[in-house]
Amino acid sequence: MNSPISEDDLHAYADCQLASSRLTQVEAWLAAHPERRAQVADWRSQSANLHRVYDNVLDEPVPARLLPAANARRWIDGRRVAAVVWLTLGTVIGFVLRAEIVRDPLPSMAVASLPRQAAVAHAVFVPEVRHPVEVGSDQEAHLVAWLSKRLGATLKPPRLDEVGYRLIGGRLLPGEKGEVAQFMYENLAHNRLTLYVRPDAPNTDGAAFRYALEDGIDVFYWIDGRFGYALSGSTGREDMLRLATLVYQQQTKQ
Amino acid sequence: MDSRAILAELPRLRRYARALVSDRAGADDLVQDTLERALNKWHFWQRERALRPWLFSIMHNLHVDGRRRDGRVEFRDGEDLPQPIQRAEQFDALELRDLERALTLLPLDQREVLLLVGLEDLSYSEVALALGIPQGTVMSRLSRARIRLKQVLAGESTPQLKVVKP
């Protein structure tokens, strides 16, 4: 325990990071070495002065440009901003109206939020040119393992190659009660589809197939097993129904 | 973990960035890039790891990358120097301004360690995590930074100025 006092000890003492067992030793040593004591005091005043110079930044109002930094650059396109604003507004209005009309809104609310969330996620990431997905389809095994681990159940992206849509990849997004997965597909005409998969969906409504038009985005959604699925795209209701049916068939076979 | 936890760190990220970069707009650009990257990558963040060192590590990497990209040389002219401090009293405002200026004369690796320890009050192990270096390196950089800062403040060391004979 009585190892000689090192340079590191002195810094740790100055920074209040010294283990308490060592404290008395260092203090005793410093009492006998006034030059080093002055140096330690100097280090402390350097730190105190740093706080005096920069602590006012903590009290400054945070510039507005930093607050929506989560989304600002992704949503820089005005149309995307508009889509997101309308979808969010719709969610709020929808919530208020439903709360008025439906006496027991909770189970159906959870389902009703699925197409909106899916459409918001679709509107945000589909126009993305550089980073539409986090993990590309070239690493599909990794993608499946990663998403399955995160969502707590095996989740394989459906294959839509037979109808001309190639899997680009997937990403994880924060959802209401945990993480949700989004797979993205693209055809030769550069139309993009997203499949939004939410693991926390309640299983009460069975596998009813539903349709919603969310600000120009066609969304087919259903609950199956542990997951809620929502397929979003902009190629028209008929086409989307065909694609959603294909996804549904594949997912139920899994 | 949600983005609110990251947003709660905003004031400290801004303080550190301001001390690191010293021009206001550049510092906030760095914070903005840090936030964006953190929010994109937040599921890679391991929950057992403290959030703050992780955010500082993102900022560190972005800053180093940015400087490398700009081919930045450690040089400042008079207009680039920090503005006078508003809060401090008139008398020691000059002293504090000297400190701000002296910081800009420290090599980046020393400046980072000094600020993370002295200003951000991170533990040595957190600094090591944030900068991706061994703790022993943290200690040696800290030691050199403190010596160098004192020299600069004492006017002992101005290697940037060469004496040119007429």
Image (cartoon, grey):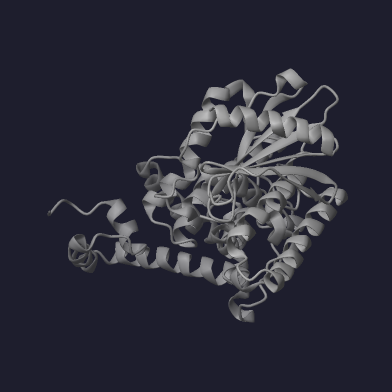
Which of A184/B70 is in front?
Answer: A184
Furthest residue to the left?
A1
Furthest residue to the top?
A162
**Position of residue B133 measured from the top left corner of the image (x, y, whole percent):** 43, 40
- A4 relative to A17, above or below: above
- Which quadrant does the N terminus of chain A fall into? bottom left
**Position of residue A84 measured from the top left corner of the image (x, y, whole percent):** 78, 54
Specify whether A235 is left or right of B42: right
Tell me what residue is drawn at x 56 percent, y 62 percent: B12
Tell me what residue is drawn at x 82 percent, y 52 percent: A83
- A65 relative to A252, above or below: below
Q: Quadrant of residue A54?
A: bottom right
**Position of residue A179 measured from the top left corner of the image (x, y, whole percent):** 55, 47
User: Can residue A169 be seen by looking at this rendering?
Assistant: no
Which of A249/B137 is in front?
Answer: A249
Specify whether A211 is left or right of B31: right
Which of B52/A187 is in front?
Answer: A187
Tell me what residue is drawn at x 51 percent, y 43 percent: A226
User: Can residue B10 be seen by looking at this rendering?
Assistant: yes
Specify whether A42 is left or right of B99: left
**Position of residue A160 measured from the top left corner of the image (x, y, whole percent):** 70, 24
Count the marks.
0
Specify whether A165 is left or right of A152: right
Q: Quadrant of residue A140?
A: top right
- B22 relative to A98, above or below: above
Which of A87/B28 is in front?
Answer: A87
Q: Quadrant of residue A139?
A: top right
